[in-house]
Image: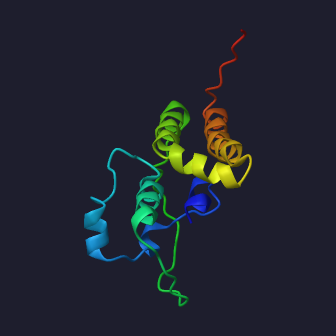
Amino acid sequence: MTKEILSLEYTPYTSSIMLKRECYEDLNGFDERYNRHQDYEFLLRFFKKFRIGVVKEPLLEIRGNDIDNKLYGRQLEELKDNFLEQFKEEIQEIELNEKNFYKKVLARHYSVVFVTYLKKNQLVMLCV
């Protein structure tokens, strides 16, 4: 599951995750320094110590809302930088068995950043 989270092939819905309180406390809960990706970060730490199962019966319905708590532009770029730095060892470990995994992860994460710069009209051309 670590590989899928890092490569953004799996998007966790925090409300759909059930775990024992002891696991949560052992990991010191969510890292509040993250404005976004706190669920990714938590699960990556979780999978280093614990396993997860699947309940095949649907127990919740996920609906949208009007709240926009997304990050854009530079804020999102900084979040991605910190997130990828925190989990670089895990990325490198997967890279040993899956060539170009690192490039795939960077492309998926930073393409999202690029799109937010475009949407907010914050792109700057640099001539070097």
- Compared across the picture, whether 98 is left or right of 11 comes to right
Q: In the image as oriented, which residue stretches furthest toward the bottom?
A: 57
* Residue 109: percent from left, percent from top: 62, 44
Residue 78 to residue 91: above or below: above
Q: In the image as oriented, which residue stretches furthest toward the top?
A: 128
- Compared across the picture, whether 99 is left or right of 48 comes to right
The residue under the point 65% across, 19% down is 124
Query: Is 91 or 54 nearer to us in this picture?
Result: 91
Query: Is 22 or 126 nearer to us in this picture?
Result: 22
* Residue 68: percent from left, percent from top: 48, 51
Residue 13 to residue 42: above or below: below
- Compared across the picture, whether 123 is left or right of 41 comes to right
* Residue 74: percent from left, percent from top: 52, 30
- Compared across the picture, whether 78 is left or right of 101 comes to left
The residue under the point 59% across, 46% down is 92
The residue under the point 45% across, 43% down is 86
Here the colouring is: rainbow
Point out the image quarter for the C terminus.
top right
The residue under the point 66% across, 49% down is 95
Query: Is 124 or 55 nearer to us in this picture?
Result: 55
* Residue 97: percent from left, percent from top: 69, 55
Q: How many labels were placed on the picture?
A: 0
Point out the image quarter for the N terminus.
bottom right
